[in-house]
Amino acid sequence: MTKHKHHPHEPASDAEQKQAEGASTAEPTPAGVAQPQAAENPLAKLQAELAAAKDRELRCHAELDNFRKRAAREREDMARYSNMGLLRDLLPVLDNVERAIQAADKNADAVALLDGFKMVDQQMRDVLNRHNCKPIEALHMPFDPNVHHAVMQQPSDEYPANTVLMVTQNGYQLHDRVVRPSQVIVSIAK
């Protein structure tokens, strides 16, 4: 069977017209009523909504991942440079130690050297205090194993047992945490 090609000047046969109408719509339509397009098709609409939801989900995951990476970098930088303020405050103390050493090289006056180091000691204590690092009170206080480290025990007539008689090394705490416990000699009963 040979197919007849329709020329624009020839009228179309009934079979060709029915085939053309069948290709334009999948379902027969009542005369004069337009058939809804694929966008109103519920399945196509759901597929479009699903694709949009998947896209939003991917974007949210990417945004969350970027936030986590940025927060991790900020935490690392904060930890890495957390002592910057302390170091800036300590550098003038180091400068004064260097000046005291230079002065001692030029002048053999021990009194001037001692005064210089007393000033450096006070400056260092001020820096520690500004950074909330305070000495732990220990002398003649009851022994507290949370903040004191007993290096020796000694009998005493003057103080009750478990009292700090002497501090061999000062301890310090930052806010409420012990940086270094005080090394102490503790009294015992005779």
Image: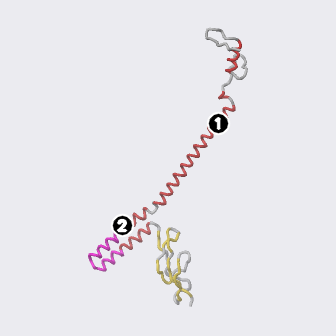
Residue 154 place in picture, x, y as percent: 52, 87
Residue 111, image x, y percentages: 31, 80
Q: For residue 1, which numbered disc appears in the image?
A: none
Report the residue that reaches farthest toward the front. 1
**Which of these two is toward me, 133 or 42?**
42
Residue 73 is covered by the magenta coloring: no
* Range of magenta residues: 93-118
What amino acid type should be assigned to the residue bearing mark 2?
A: Pro
Majority secondary structure of the magenta segment?
Answer: helix
**Residue sitting at 49 percent across and 80 percent down?**
139
In space, the residues marked 2 and 1 are separated at their CA atoms by 65 Å
State the count of labels.
2
Neighbor class of circle 1 (other Cα within 10 Å; few <14, some 14-19, many 20+) is few
Say left or right for 179 vs 50: left
Q: Nearer the viewer, residue 83 or 189?
A: 83
Question: What residue is drawn where x is 61% and y is 8%?
Answer: 9
Q: Which residue is mark 1?
A: 49
Left or right: residue 87 compared with residue 60: left
Q: Residue at x 40, y 71 (%)?
A: 124
Q: Which residue corresponds to the image point at 72% horizontal and 22% vertical from the top-left?
A: 27
Say which quadrant the C terminus sits in: bottom right
> Viewer-nearest of labels 2 and 1?
1
Task: Classify mark 2: residues with Cα within 10 Å, few (<14), some (14-19) or many (20+).
Answer: some
Q: Which residue is mark 2?
A: 92
In the rendered structure, which amino acid carries the disc numbered 1? Glu
